[in-house]
Image (cartoon, rainbow, N blue to C red):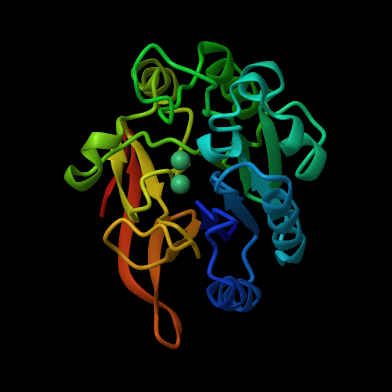
Amino acid sequence: MTVRIAQISDLHFGREIPRIAEVLLDDLRAARPTVVAVCGDLTQRAREREFAAAKAFLDELPAPALVVCGNHDLPGWRVWSRFARPWRRWRRHITATDPNAAVSLTADGLAAVGVNTARRWGPHPDWSRGRISARQVAAIEEAFDAAAPGDLRVVVAHHPFLLTTAGRSRGMVGGSALALRRLRHRADLLLGGHVHLGYSGVVAGMVVAQAGTAFSNRLKGEPNGYNLIDADETGLTVTMLRCVEAGFEAYDRSRYVRDNEGWRAA
Ligand SMILES: [Fe+2]
Ligand SMILES: [Fe+2]
């Protein structure tokens, strides 16, 4: 069974570049993914019009999408809203279901679970940092335990489970140690965004793929980009694409295979 995941992140409507958003949609139509993973930060400041634009974009995606929230989808400095009704606009525009409940998406050969790692506050000065709770990890375990044997098991979140030197200051998702311990041998692939840098690697026997900002002008030292991930019985390949003058082009390809210890770079 061959599965293709398109991973896009950090759309940041309000700071979007419309031309690149159009080019991305054309690319995705041509790529014909099984599913699209949308790794959060749909908006820049959680405004009504930004959510409306994000929803219009999501409606154009050519495959079923699994969409999770990012820290920018919370009311930033509207403190009362942030604490009393943090997801009101998300629920009005994106999906009415409780964003704190795990969302599942299954397709032939694939079981994906999305969790909301954005938090209203944290016990540290940087409230943009996210967290995964024990309850969310349990929901992921439950979904994967019910999945068909042989399915690729994919976790979709906003905050990263792996950082490179360039993104070290952003911090890993809180609770990552517990999550990685419990998901080892249960999950295959952890997808994230937030850092606005594209890279992949292996942690705790699982492949982590991070996508940059798909089409916002909030660049952190590299062009807009997204990932295509192809998996079959023999392994998986993460292809990173970045936007150049004419459109997106592949610039890096990483291959991963699995043995008894878990996943490793091929
Ligand atoms: Fe972002
Ligand atoms: Fe973020």
For residue 115, say whether it is visible. yes
Which quadrant holds the N terminus?
bottom right
Give above or below for 110 relative to 69. below
List x then y, in percent, for residue 124: 34, 16
Give above or below for 226 relative to 133. below
List x then y, in percent, for residue 245: 40, 86
Q: Residue at x 78, y 40 (%)?
A: 95
List x then y, in percent, for residue 187: 48, 33
The answer to whether 172 appears left or right of 73 in the picture is left
Q: Residue at x 31, y 37 (%)?
A: 162
Q: Residue at x 34, y 50 (%)?
A: 257
Which quadrant holds the C terminus?
bottom left
Q: Residue furthest bottom?
A: 246
| The quarter of the displayed image where residue 145 is located | top right
For residue 190, say whether it is visible. no
Q: How many marks?
A: 0
The answer to whether 56 appears left or right of 245 in the picture is right
Q: Residue furthest left?
A: 165
| The quarter of the displayed image where residue 202 is located | top left
The answer to whether 133 appears left or right of 123 in the picture is right
Give above or below for 238 relative to 103. below
Nearest the eye: 144 or 18: 18
Nearest the eye: 125 or 130: 125
List x then y, in percent, for residue 73: 60, 38
Q: Residue at x 39, y 48 (%)?
A: 209
